[in-house]
Image: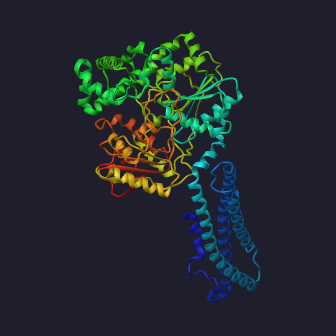
Amino acid sequence: MGFDHNEQQILDADLVASSRPTTVMEVRAFLEQLGTDERFKALTQLTEGYREFLQNLLEILDVKMEAARDDFIKRKEALVELQKAENRPCGPSTVEAWKKEVNELRIIWTNHASFVKEQPTELADRLTNAAALAKDLRRLRERVTKVWTRFDKLLDKHIRFAADHRPKIEDLDRFVLANEQEKLVTWDYDGEARLVGPAGSGKTIVLLQRALRLACENPNHNVRIFTINRSLAGELQDSLHRLPGGSAKNIHIQSFHDFLARILLDSGKLTKSQLRVDDKKSKEGIANSESWSDFAENELMKCKRAGLDLLLGLSKRLGEKAGKAYLYEEIHYIQSAVPNECRSEYLKLPRKCRRIPMQEDDRIWALEVLAAWEEWLEKGSLSDPESWAGTAAHLFDNSRTVRGIQREFPADFVLIDEEQDFGTVELCIVMKYLQDKPSKNRLFLTGDLRQKVFAKHHDTRAAGMNFQGKSRKLDQTYRCTQQILRAAHEIAIHFGVDTDDDVEVVDPKLSRFEGALPQVIGVSHEGHVDRLEQLVGELRIQFPSDRIAIVTEDEALRVKIQNRLRWPNVLRNEDPQHTAERTQVKTDNVVSRMNAVKGFEFDTVIVANLSTSQLPRIASNEDEWWRDGALVYTALTRARTRLYITFEERPSPFLAVMREHVDWIDRPPV
C-alpha cells in the first residue's frame, strides 16, 4: 500500500522541485530578487503553496490511515474468531498492537495539521511564518519518508499474515455473508428458484446457508443436497460442518448418481457387481471411457454396419480419436435428454449445443450404436452411470413408487449444486421426486454455464421448471485473485458458452485479492514430469500449508505424475467408488482430470500440458471449442492464490488468448 500515481504527483509537485525555497535564507534571497510590489504577492503565493501542499498531504494520508485502521479492526474481529480454532495463527493482541501503531501515525498527521491556519497580515510576520513553515515542511518530508517506510513494513507484515492464513480467514467469511448473499439465504419463493454466478462468487456458500436455514426452521423436515459426484459431496459435507449449526441431522448430502444407484439396486435394475470400479480381471463394474474405446474398436467394428458408418464419418471429419470421443458424447447426450422409453424423440431434438450436424439417418444410427453399447455392457456385467437416470425415470411415474423412494430418501426441500451438469432427465426425476411436497422453497438450484463441461442435454423448461421472476445472480467474485480471474475470463470472452436452456451468463466482478500473474512454463516432453516435480518441491518449501492440484487432460502424463509424487487421484467424476455410503475423501494434494476438480478450491493449481496436442480435443472444428474452453476455465478458477500452466512445443489456443494476462517464463511463447 503506497501512493498511487495521482497522489505521488501531488506530493512531488512542490517539494521535489529545486526552485522552491525551503529555508529562511532561501526565502529571503528569493524575495530580495523581486520588487516591493511583487514581494507581497510572491510571499502570499509561496505560503499558500506550502499550505495547499500540506492540506493535500493530510487529506491523502487521512484517507489511507482511516482505511488501514478499518482493515485492521476487521482483521482483529477475524482473529477473535480464529482464537476459537485449534491452530489459530496469532492472537488478537497482535492486531491490537498494529492498530495502536496506526493510531500513533494518525496523530502525527493531525499534529502537522495545526500548521495550516490563517496567515498574518504584516509582510514581516508573513516572512517569518513562511520560513518557519518551510523549515517544518522540510522536516515533515523527511518524517513522511521514515513513517511511510515504517507503515509499509507494517502493511507488508499484515499482507504476509493474510496470505499465510487466507484459507482460515476465508472460512470465517462463511460466517459473515455479503448483503446480496444474505438476502438470497432468507429469500422465500414458490416452487423452484435458480441462482447463477461466475466461479468463486459464493453460490455454494449461499446454498449451504439456505440448507441450514431450512433445516433449523423446519426441524421435523428433511433437506437434501444433490451434487454431481461423490468427491464434491464430501467437500460440501466438510464445508457444512465448518458452519455454525452445520451438524444438523436433517440435512443429507449425496451425489445424484449415488441416489439413482441405490434406487436401481432396490428395484433390481442394477447389481452390486455393476457398481464396482471397473475390475481389470473380472471386467465387471462401472464403465468408463476406456470401456467405450474397447467397444468402439472391437464390437462396433464387427457387427453394427450403420454405427460403423457413423463412426467412420465422424472420424473422417474430426480425426479418429476425436470422432470416437464425439460419438461417445452424443450417446451421453441422448441418455440425458430423453428416458429410455422415449428415445425416438431424439430424432427431432434441436441439439442446440451440439455444433456438428446430425441428419435423421445419422441420428437413427446413433440410436443403434446406443442400443449396441448397452447390450455390450449388459453382457459384460458393466454399467454406465449416464444411463441410470434414463433407466430410473419410469419408476418416478408411479406415485406409489415415489412414496417408497421418499421413505428411503426423505426430502421436503432439495438444493442442487452445479446444476448446469445435470441432464434434463435427471432434473425431471427431481421434479417428480418432490411433486407431493409443499411448494414453498421446495427446490433451489445453483450453477454457472461457463463451467458446463459435460455433453449433456440440459433444459430446465423441458424438465417442468419455471424460473419466471425467481432467478437471481451473483457477480462479485471472492475466490481467485484478480490476476487469475482476468486470465481465465479471456477464455470465456473468446469462446463463449452454449446450452439447450435459457439462462443468463453472468460476467464477474474482480475480487479484492491481488496476487502474482499466472506463470506459464514451456517444457520439453522428456523433462515435463521432472519440471513438475521441481515446481511442487519449491511450492512445498515456500507454502507448506497449501492445497495443491495438478490437473491435466494428458492421461499418460497424469499417470506418470501420480507414480512420481504418490498423490491420490480421488476426484474421478465418472467413477463412483465401491459403495454409495462412502463420501469422505481427502483432497489436500491431488492429480486429476480437469472436469473432476469442478466445485473444489485449491491454494495452488498447476494446469499441466495445455498444448495444442491435448486441447482442444476436436481441433478441426472451432465451433466445438467452447466446451473445452469451459473445461479449461473451470480448471483455472479452482486456484485461489497461485496458478501455473505448462505446455510442450505449441501452446493451446486457450493459452494463447490469455497471452497479455500471464507471465511467460522458462521459454517464450511460440
Residue 350 visible somewhere in the drawing: no
**Total numbered labels:** 0
* Screen quadrant of the N terminus: bottom right
What residue appears at the point 71 percent right and 71 percent down from the top-left corner? 108
Please state if 343 lies on the left or on the right of 402 as rendered: left
Residue 330 visible somewhere in the drawing: yes
* In the foreground, 321 or 68: 321
What residue appears at the point 73 percent right and 71 percent down from the top-left corner? 113
Q: Position of residue 632 (x, y in %)?
A: 41, 41
* In the foreground, 268 or 470: 268
- Tell me if residue 388 comes above or below residue 514 in the rendering: above
Q: Position of residue 332 (x, y in %)?
A: 39, 25
Q: Position of residue 356 (x, y in %)?
A: 32, 28
User: In the orientation shown, which residue stands out farthest toward the front?
Assistant: 281
- Tell me if residue 31 comes above or below residue 226 in the rendering: below
- Tell me if residue 56 comes above or below residue 219 in the rendering: below
* In the foreground, 647 or 127: 647
Please state if 478 lies on the left or on the right of 244 as rendered: left
Q: Position of residue 86 (x, y in %)?
A: 64, 49
Quadrant hosting residue 128: bottom right
